[in-house]
Amino acid sequence: MQKAVSIMYTVFSFQSPTDAYCLVYLIDESQKAYCLLPYRQQTTGNFPVKANRRYVLFSPKDADRSIASLVDEYILNSQESKEYNQLYIIFSPNPLTKTIDRSTTELMPRETTVENFRKWLARCRRTDLDMAVEVKNIVIKGQP
């Protein structure tokens, strides 16, 4: 019998004082790094941000109309009682491009190994002193 799952909708809202670029990655317990932003249909390798503009990520209904059709909406769930993940929010006023990754299915975000992600992030931080990285620990709770 399969355990019930807990579902968490992921939505972020922010505003930047300057033009910049943003990337978001999720690291799961299986040591995979998933690229959540830029969205799967974006071909630029980054998510450009305009100054003084409000952004709502991962919500097509709240996104700017110009990108609403590109927005990926994610539902995080777990078959375990608890699953520990990390979100990496990467922000820079300098152009940056996501790490090399691969697409596995139409419904899942692009992925790479945690090792490849960490090597890429370390290289980026050495060359871009303006880059800011915020790590958010999240717990996805399953149902007993």
Image (cartoon, rainbow, N blue to C red):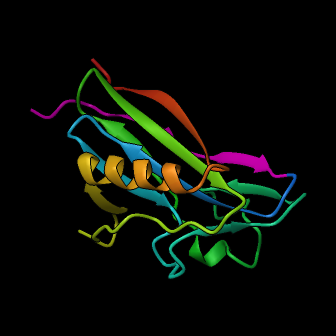
Quadrant housing the N terminus:
top left
Q: Is residue 142 left or right of residue 66?
A: left
On screen, residue 144 above or below 104: above
Q: Residue at x 25, y 34 (%)?
A: 29
The picture places residue 140, in percent across and down from the top left corner, at 39, 29
The picture places residue 13, in percent across and down from the top left corner, at 73, 47
Q: Residue at x 76, y 75 (%)?
A: 65
Q: Residue at x 20, y 30 (%)?
A: 3
Residue lying at the far bottom in this picture: please name it.
43
On screen, residue 10 above or below 34: above
On screen, residue 105 above or below 30: below
Q: Examine the image and state in which quarter residue 78 appears.
A: top left
**Which one is nearer the viewer's eye here, 45 or 53?**
45
- In the image, residue 142 lies in the stretch drawn in magenta: no
Residue lying at the far right in this picture: please name it.
52
Residue lying at the far left in this picture: please name it.
1
Q: Is residue 59 left or right of residue 65?
A: left
The picture places residue 125, in percent across and down from the top left corner, at 51, 49
Q: Is residue 64 left or right of residue 97?
A: right
Q: Residue at x 42, y 58 (%)?
A: 35
Q: Which residues are magenta?
A: 1-16
Q: Examine the image and state in which quarter residue 71 appears.
A: bottom right
The picture places residue 37, in percent across and down from the top left corner, at 52, 60
Q: How many marks?
A: 0
Q: Is residue 131 left or right of residue 19?
A: left
Quadrant housing the C terminus:
top left
Q: Examine the image and state in which quarter residue 82 appears.
A: top left
